[in-house]
Image (tube, rainbow, N blue to C red):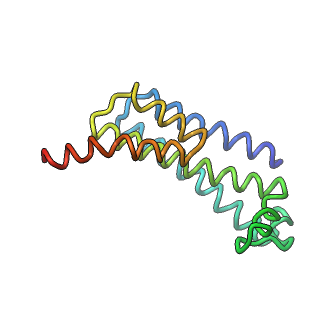
Amino acid sequence: MSWNTIYLLANYWAFVGWLMLAFAPRSPRILSFIMYAGVLLLCLLYLVLITGFLTGGIDPGGQGGGSFSSLAGVMKLFDTPGGATLGWVHYLAFDLFTGMWIARDADGKGFGRIVQVPFLFLTLMAGPVGLFLWLIVRERRARAQAKAG
């Protein structure tokens, strides 16, 4: 299977999770599906890819002098199709997990879907930006709930 195919399949799979998170009912069954069929499988894919990548078993880029100890080393790791795909799957898994946390947190604090969707979209498109803005917005309601409880 080509790196492009792995990239596309991971993208589409994560996007299904995002669509469900934004628009499907938030039943325990749906949330479990997103967590285990979405996040867990992306994490498993990442585990397989990073193991093969760093050992040189699936892409020689991991053995080409790249490392996580310097910017130049990280750039070298990502300078192959395998390295770029590996980095992308990492983002997909963590952003979807973060989106799940935001959605569950927003549900627990009484924010409706219409308020949640922009934060979920920002998290999908620019991970930390969506999380940062959600943390700011949620703070006031979190304090009010803590005070009332």
**Residue drawn where x is 63% and y is 54% of the image:** 90
Percent position of residue 83, x then y: 78, 58
**Residue drawn where x is 54% and y is 44% of the image:** 129
Percent position of residue 143, x then y: 23, 47
Q: Which of 105 and 28 is in front in this view?
A: 105
Q: In this view, does 78 lie to the left or right of 133?
A: right
Q: Is residue 44 above or below residue 141?
A: below
Percent position of residue 32, x then y: 42, 44
Q: In this view, does 13 lie to the left or right of 135?
A: right
Residue 46 falls in which quadrant of the image?
A: bottom right
Q: Which of 97 and 133 is in front in this view?
A: 133
Total numbered labels: 0
Residue ranking furthest to the left? 148
Percent position of residue 122, x then y: 54, 37
**Residue drawn where x is 48% and y is 31% of the image:** 118
Q: Is residue 4 left or right of residue 69?
A: right
Q: In this view, does 114 lie above or below 21?
A: above
Q: Is residue 149 left or right of residue 28?
A: left
**Residue drawn where x is 32% and y is 37% of the image:** 107
Residue 47 falls in which quadrant of the image?
A: bottom right
